Image (cartoon, coloured by chain):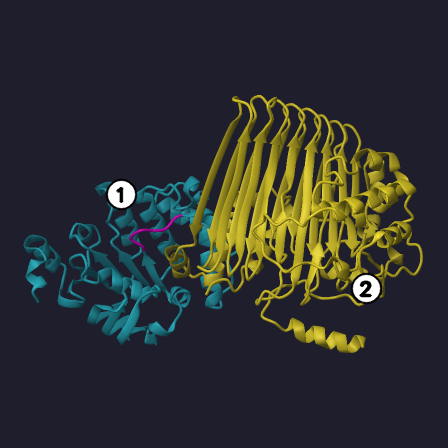
Chain colours: A yellow, B cyan
Amino acid sequence: MAAVQETVDRVRQIDVDQYRYGFETIIESEKAPKGLSEDTIRFISAKKNEPEWMLEWRLEAYRRWLTMQEPTWARVDYPKIDYQDLYYYAAPKPKKEISSLDEIDPEILKTYEKLGIPLREVEALEGVVRPEGERKVAVDAVFDSVSVATTFQEELKKAGVIFMPISHAIQQHPELVKQYLGSVVPTSDNFFATLNSAVFSDGSFVYVPPGVRCPMELSTYFRINERNTGQFERTLIIADKGSYVSYLEGCTAPQRDENQLHAAVVELVALDDAEIKYSTVQNWYPGNSEGKGGIYNFVTKRGDCRGAHSKISWTQVETGSAITWKYPSCILRGDNSRGEFYSIAISNGYQQVDSGTKMLHLGKNTTSRIISKGIAAGKSQNTYRGLVTAHRKAANARNFTACDSLLIGDKCGAHTVPYIEAKNTSALFEHEATTSKISEDVLFYCVQRGLSQEEAVGLVVNGFVRDVLQQLPMEFAVEAQKLISISLEGSVG
Amino acid sequence: MPLLEVKDLQVRVEEREILHGLSLTVNKGEVHAIMGPNGSGKSTLSHVIAGKPGYEVTGGQILFNGEDLLEMEPDERAAKGVFLAFQYPVEIPGVATMTFLRTALNAQRKARGESEYSTPNFLKKVRDVAASLNIPQDMLRRGINVGFSGGEKKRNEVLQMALFEPSLCILDEMDSGLDIDALRVAADGVNALRSPDRAMVVITHYQRLLNYIVPDFVHVMSKGRVVKSGNKDLALELEASGYAQFEEA
């Protein structure tokens, strides 16, 4: 059976599609029974060996979810999801309790190797000399529903930084988890976030103590492997007073004909004078050229600038997923706090993107900046949806928004939906928006100088997104640039 | 063998015939001026040689070093040595001029099976050429043509011409929008590139440009054909008598 399946999958992959990460890893896995019920949630909670309070938290969320309606306001269109036809938990079958990287299933390590994710810390342990300037990145890898490995634990521990799977944090740091989990995205927040609260299985947890500058980039790599499985990860990052952390996340999935659900929640908390920089390169499987398959990416990401002079910066490069529904936001609660959102959202084929941000100015002298670059090609639809509000007490709130859209071809669409509300007269909000098409003249100029059509499009697009790419950590910027070219392959008719 | 041979070329744009059987032969080392009133088909000729989409060739042929140019993609033509200096060079925000030059030069070299330039060699080459054209380093770091003055845009075209070392340079209305000083700088740059291995086709409406770039041959175009050819004196003659004499032809 497995062999037949493999052949079928191979044939499937001989396709016009350019998705590089579409392979599947054949490993044994353990799943929860199909469908969603209190029993499923008890199963997950038991698997994670969770304390009673955590199970109660989940069940409360589940009961709330049962009363909620799936939102329909986004400019995306998809058949109704049957939530009873999904698996909510899948884990690589453990041979035994894992205590070091050597005990991880080699197939999983191979998967991450293929993806170019440096999971092994052997190099560092053996003192391998690295090229100058190359920074260390600590990686947490989440495979379907569980975290399989977190690297550089020792070095982080020395700095006092906690970086571990959230399932471990629930056991080892319950006081922190209890204090902050759901404090930015409450269990009742929205349909998908509430679903996540009920069934999340793993994700990353970060705590940076007061005054500490995290000594390396932290990174989580998410991989959906199993069929018919939703991935519901939950990430919680807390930057205590005066601390700094930069966090990267990457995601891929195998090519499959059926759609898969990904509903994550990310919560960030920045206390006084703290800064969090959160970067995402989202490359879930986008579906094939006929619009079949692909990930439904319904994600709630929110940062709370809880302390004065705190800062949260979101940078995202969104190239994957059949549907993206995602609005990384900042609650600017602390006086003089600052929120930033830099986004590149690329859609090709039949992809649908509805993404943007919310900047909620609550404190005095709060500032925010939004730079959004949407690129639509093929038959895709690309929407920027943003909300900027100033509370009555948010004196001197400032926002600058620039939304630029670039169209490639004439069968795609770009839309900008900004909402602006100022409840005090000292707020100053600026909004700029442009929509342009890559003109024939620009393309001809480039090809006359020797570039191929595709190189020309790549060059123009990279120029278009340049100010956002510059916000990414170096290692990611190069990767993102390549990804942008790959995503747009075949977009020139 | 001539470098460029245009034989009885017929071209349509959206059902309307623009060139009605145009012929032109250009040998290496020669500079040809093509003059004519607006709408005579001068720019169409330059676009068709370079391979701009939107033109339908309904008859005739274009040979470049004996090869059928019309069979090649525009980027292949560039790699083979066809260079078009644009009348209105485009602006590409966010793409530094230096990056553009390097990407284009390496693409051409790759297409010809040559190795790519190393960074130090490339930088040295660009700096030398830029210095000779009075192009400040700062301009090379800016987005290509973004915020450039008319003169800077044209010098940037000449810079690329010098860098890519094409065997055929077509200059489309290089004098448009330039004051006399800017024109002189650009023309000096072009003259420095004249060589026995290279030919130039200078397309212009006015004789003025030809005081700076002195042609070996002058062709007058009218209504999609070459109606008269001669040496540089023909340009002066036109300046005196105007194009009207050819309009009825």
Q: Residues within 10 Å of mark 1 (few under 14, many from 20)?
A: some
Q: CA distance from mark 2 to mark 1?
A: 66 Å
Q: Residues within 10 Å of mark 2 (few under 14, many from 20)?
A: few
Quarter occupied by residue A302: top right
The magenta span reads: B86-91
Q: Position of residue B96 (x, y in %)?
A: 46, 46
Disc 2 vs disc 1: which is toward the camera?
Answer: 2
Question: On the image, numbered disc 1 is attached to which residue?
Answer: B182
Q: Does label 1 lie on the same chain as label 2?
A: no
Q: Say whether residue B124 is left or right of residue A238.
A: left
- Which secondary structure, mark 2? helix
Q: Residue at x 30, y 63 (%)?
A: B47
Dominant SS type (magenta):
loop
Q: Say whether residue A323 is left or right of residue A407.
A: right
Q: Residue at x 71, y 40 (%)?
A: A189
**Amino acid beneath label 2:** Glu
Reply above or below: A265 against A412: above
The chain that hosts pointer 2 is: A
Question: On the image, numbered disc 2 is attached to which residue?
Answer: A107
Q: Position of residue B79 (x, y in %)?
A: 41, 65
Residue A464 in sight in this render: no
- Which secondary structure, mark 1? helix
Q: Quadrant of the N terminus of chain A?
A: bottom right
Along the viewing direction, whichever of A63 and B53 lies nearer the viewer: A63
Q: Does B89 lie within the magenta span?
A: yes
Spot the residue most to the front.
Answer: A67
The chain that hosts pointer 1 is: B
